Amino acid sequence: MKLLKNKYFKIILFLFICLNVIAFIHAYKLTHFTASNSQKTKSPEKLSSFEKAKTLLFGVNNPKPQNKKFPTQKYQTIKLKSNKEIECWLIKNQNSRGTVILFHGYGGEKSSIIDKSNEFLKLGFNTMLIDFMGSGNSEGNQTTIGFKESEEVKTCFDYITSTGEKNIYLFGTSMGAVAIMKCIDDSQINPKGIIIECPFGSMYKTVCARFKKMHAPTFPMARILLFWGGIQNGFWGFNHNPSEYAEKINCPTLLLYGEKDKSVSRSEIDEIYKNLKGFKELHVYKNTGHENYLIKNELQWSQDVNSFLSSI
């Protein structure tokens, strides 16, 4: 009986170690980009059964995002020293209504938000597009899914403030939205308004969503992965909760969401919206997932944004 118990204990210990090793690899791959010339892992829907199994064991291959296009307007390249050195593009508009600072999502870079910048320029605003740390021409290969990026939001806000601009707006999609929310929670900056697209409710829920898209069980791997991701990146991932950050956001807020989003649930969006203080609006786009809203909703997006900016 004692030998049998020892055998079971060794099997359980072995499985526990294996789960932690796999989670450790996943956490590192999730928060560290590979070389820009490496091959990116395909989306879960396009993976074969063998490729899915391989990905579940060894994590995704995520090359460092590179800026592949540039603004057609005259722009200034600015380097700012934050927790990392970040690169920004500043585009000025004559007789502007203010300045919109734009922040991209996970796996993106500032060239991926040029189309959004163009919409704000049409509406009469200056724009500043940001490469978060690890992306584009900014320093490093690390991403913390909005946690440390929040410091870079503050750096950019302070820079535009130092130019004498009074009407500062923040725009962020996905991870960019989360970074904005955490920045306001941490530093109490007071933009004239923010526009946030599909922010997740908690880091734990967004990790679970990744497993669900792979049709893999979330327990216990999601929690183990989040634990190791926090250890690797110097923060407690279980406290990275934008739904709680929302409770300290008092500035006017436009919250946008796609009803078919598989990365962020409607319940997460509803909780964030409920917790927001002050003037707020929520617009949900039909037949739209976790994607660039301009692809399917360009006219409606522009109308929603212009109406919001004109009302505050």
Image: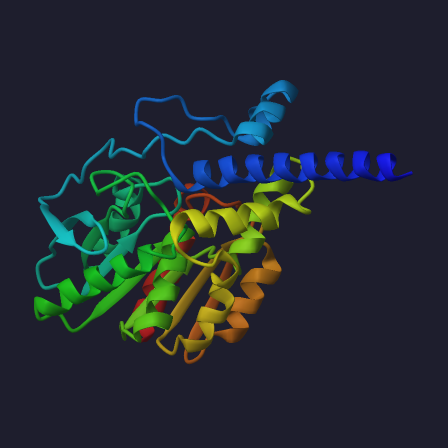
Residue toward you, 57 or 295: 57
In the image, is 265 to the left or to the right of 105? right
Res 194 → quadrant: bottom left
Residue at x-position 31% and y-position 40%: 112
Where does residue 270 sit, x and y in percent of width and height? 57, 66
Res 274 → quadrant: bottom right
The figure's colour scheme reads rainbow
Where does residue 189 sit, x and y in percent of width and height? 27, 73
Q: Is residue 96 visible?
A: yes
Residue toward you, 42 or 4: 4
Q: Is residue 263 visible?
A: no
Residue at x-position 30% and y-position 45%: 113
Q: Is residue 187 above or below residue 50?
A: below
Looking at the figure, which quarter contains the C terminus? bottom left
Res 300 → quadrant: bottom left
In the image, is 100 to the left or to the right of 52? left
Looking at the figure, which quarter contains the N terminus? top right
Where does residue 64 sit, x and y in percent of width and height? 32, 33
Residue at x-position 41% and y-position 77%: 248
The number of numbered discs placed on residues in the rendered structure image is 0
Residue most toward the right?
1
Residue toward you, 30 or 281: 30
Residue at x-position 33% and y-position 56%: 148
Residue most toward the front?
2
Q: Is residue 22 above or below residue 99?
A: above
Residue toward you, 237 or 158: 237
In the image, is 262 to the left or to the right of 236? right
Where does residue 162 sit, x and y in percent of width and height? 10, 68
